[in-house]
Image (spheres, rainbow, N blue to C red):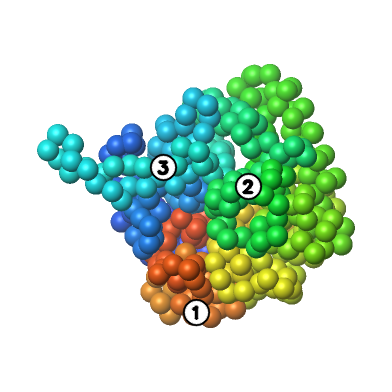
Amino acid sequence: MFDHLKQGIRNLGKPQWQPVLQYVVQLHEKCTRSVEEPFQYPWEEIGLGYVNGPAFGHIDITHQALDTVAYEPLHAIHQILNNLALETQDGLVPGAIWMRDKQMKQGVLVTKPDWNPRKAFPPLWPAVIEEHSRLYDTDQYIRQCYDNLIRQIGWFERNRAAGDGGYYYLDMVERRWESGVDDGVRYIDAPKTPHACVDATSHVYMLYQYACRWARRLDLDDRQLQKKASALEAFIQNRLFCEETGFFHDIWSVNDPSRRHTTFEGMWPMVAGAATQEQAKRVIDENLLNEKRFFSLHPITTVSMEDPLFELRMWRGPVWNCMTMWAARGCMSYGRTDAAEKLLERAIDAIAAQYKKTGTVWEFYHPFIGDPMQLERKPYTPNNTPCRDYLGHMPVIYMARLWEASVQANASK
């Protein structure tokens, strides 16, 4: 099934990256399961070593699909279609879909799928559809998924709009970690009322931008979408940017140093394309490439190394390679292929080195290239170390492709 992927990674990136790239291909193959309820196509679980697995979906499946779309396009698209098939008429796309429980059905033991009907997840999946369209010069899946996108926009507008002009995740009001960033330091002193979160607001802006581009591709009227996108862009630029830090923050903390923490989520306006050129420059040069903030030996840290709440604990300091990937994508969209090359090369070098030591890939990594087992996951649970063989946050094949593109772009300047 993954012969094209196996062939495609040959000669990809640096020679010393090949062992980990080949291992990740094997994981994609091992994590892919046959068709079963509720999926229409073979589905890829988050990772064999995930402590709460088997599971499907969330932002993880976007990363896994980006990793395979260039070489196994149908497999990648099927993962997104599996997820979108569960979208409700109201527009909720489920987050994590648990496939760990069993039940008897007509005398056969089958999986009992389960998910939270109130909890969404960051809507990053359109990136896979656009990447497929770009690589294969087709609007097939843009046409097929456009209604899903519009319904999901409507769900966020109805269910996650904050009164101050942006959008929020359940992290804000219930500490339910809808954003995927469990126990994030931004919420330690945050009010438990709906306010604009920098990540949720940027993600909805991304949805508007995708919808505008897709509407134009399909010869549809995008004027109302453009109007909403422009209003949200102005809100992000004017209300969420801090001149002091050169970074974006949540609305409840951006002007309050006692509550303000510098965390990776502040990059999302740049990744989404909502930042001005000057704001993007400051995000990149003063933060992402700053060795005192996010540019660690293995970049990027989830919390700035200068922040007093930085620690070697899940989402409070360690590195999630998927977020380094999004940072690099944002840099490239603003013409900063030089920054993308630096981020990606340093990160993949560290991934390859850690694979050589441990023989696996990890849920998250030590920012100073230490032993992953020295990191804390959730101290209040029995599972207090990073998961091994975790694919959902490990799009290293796609990262290597981005690195090659950035190297090529820099060479032509």
Disc 2 marks a residue whose amino acid type is: Val
The x and y percentages for residue 220 are: 64, 19
Q: Residue furthest front?
A: 192
Q: Is residue 143 left or right of residue 268?
A: left
Disc 3 marks a residue whose amino acid type is: Trp
What residue is rendered at 58% in x and 61% in y? 183
Cβ atoms at labels 3 and 2 below 8 Å apart: no
Nearer to us: label 1 or label 2: 2
The x and y percentages for residue 126 are: 56, 38
Report the quarter where the C terminus lies: bottom right
Residue 374 - label: 1
Nearer to us: label 3 or label 2: 2
Instruction: Report if residue 68 is visible in the image.
Output: yes
Q: Nearer the viewer, residue 253 or 268?
A: 253
Disc 1 marks a residue whose amino acid type is: Gln
Q: Is residue 338 left or right of residue 403?
A: right
Q: CA distance from mark 3 to mark 2?
A: 20 Å
Q: Which residue is mark 2?
A: 173
Instruction: Tell me the element at label 3.
Output: loop
Q: Is residue 199 left or right of residue 361?
A: right
What residue is rendered at 61% in x and 60% in y? 184
Badge 3, how many Cα within 10 Å: few under 14, some, many 20+? some
What residue is rendered at 64% in x and 19% in y? 219
The x and y percentages for residue 110 are: 21, 42
Instruction: Tell me the element at label 2.
Output: helix
Q: Would you place residue 164 above or below residue 142 in this image?
A: below
Q: Is residue 209 left or right of residue 11?
A: right
Q: Which residue is mark 3?
A: 115
Precedes in sequence: disc 3 or disc 2: 3
